[in-house]
Image (cartoon, helix red, strand yellow):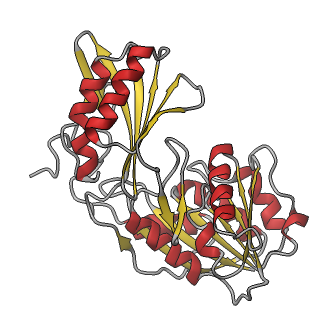
Amino acid sequence: MPHCIHFGTCGGCAFHDRHAIDKPRLLQQALERAGYPDANMAPMVETPLRTRRRADLAATRMGATISLGLHKARGGQVVDMLECALLLPEIVQLLPELRNLLRHLQAFRSSGSVVINWLDHGADILLRMDAPFTGPDKTKIIAYARAQNVLRVSIATGTELPEPVIILSSPIITFSKIAVEPPPGGFLQASRDGEAAIIAATIAGLPKLTKKSLVIELYAGAGTLSFALAQHARVAAYEGDAAAAAAQDKAIRANNLAGRMSVAQRDLHRRPLQAAEFGKAAAVVLDPPYAGAAAQMRFLAASNVARIIYVSCNPQALATDAAILNRAGYAVLSATPIDQFPFSENLESVIVFLK
């Protein structure tokens, strides 16, 4: 029996059996293409089903029909989500009333998106629609949030920056015991278990450090890894998204960590760190977006920093980026596959490179 009634139409899952594809082999092949045929592979970490805490859903309106879910596997049509084997049940339970809300929004003409992040104490929702939100729209959103006990609902039209409509309770996510208020729709690792596995593999890959050692972190987000790293060394973090960098900076200051941590907003695609800027780093940790870190890699490779820990969510991009490190004389110390995207070819991994 399929694991979900939508299997075969919804594009979220490519396989009925999560073990139908050999994910450790995917990572091994990526490293082989990069020039590492004998990389030391750690056992794969599997995250449980129904623990995904982030949903980025598409919404369409065709006449009286509202569809809210993921796109079809081969097409642009949205599959109206009634269940999901991956998402937290609490997120799925929000969808019927969200559809009802969308049906009555003037800002929703034909297409939009709904991002749901499940934080420490509930849902944080971003509605991005294709027309301006009206006063009555905002009244309906406030009523919905109160009825469903949603932490925060934010809105945006097109590519505008989000603005909160209602905050019923502080939207907080805890990273390594530090409370952070992420921006609306902000990036989170897919699950707590996956995040914990990534942190564990990253910390295990660090060299011997002192409290005065410096770790440079690239693509740091709101601090998923930053606050864990700060328990072992000084951290200089860089993040391209202004809202995510601001969220991390606010948490740093609120917890009196400014002496041990800093975060700078910097677009590492347009303005990558130069080789000389890595000079004092005992290690560099990077968690680039899906497309990889092409613009940054040649400067990182030229820096000769002794230890590089690369967190990847895309084996193909990893193969390209790791090949640059291979040509610069880096070896693979360890490679940890983490399956937090069951039923798909997507794979998280943590690779430790040694000069």
Q: Is residue 111 above or below residue 14?
A: above
Decide which of 272, 127 is in the foreground and name it: 127
Q: Is residue 115 above or below residue 283?
A: above
Residue found 28% across the figure and 53% down from its top: 88
Q: Residue furthest right?
A: 276
Q: Position of residue 23 (x, y in %)?
A: 39, 65
Q: Residue furthest top?
A: 63
Q: Is residue 19 above or below residue 271?
A: below
Residue 215 lies left or right of residue 39; in this view the side is: right
- The answer to whether residue 34 is visible is yes
Residue 190 lies left or right of residue 321; in this view the side is: left
Residue found 26% across the figure and 36% down from its top: 147
Q: Position of residue 228 (x, y in %)?
A: 58, 74
Q: Position of residue 112 (x, y in %)?
A: 42, 24
Q: Position of residue 133 (x, y in %)?
A: 46, 17
Decide which of 169, 122 is in the foreground and name it: 169
- The answer to whether residue 71 is visible is no
Decide which of 253, 21 is in the foreground and name it: 253
Task: Tell me which corner region of the image, top left, top right, bottom left or bottom right, holds residue 35.
Answer: bottom right
Residue found 60% across the figure and 61% down from its top: 223
Task: Tell me which corner region of the image, top left, top right, bottom left or bottom right, holds residue 50.
Answer: bottom left
Residue found 47% across the figure and 62% down from its top: 348
Report the number of discs: 0
Residue 72 lies left or right of residue 129; in this view the side is: left
Q: Quarter holding the C terminus? A: bottom right
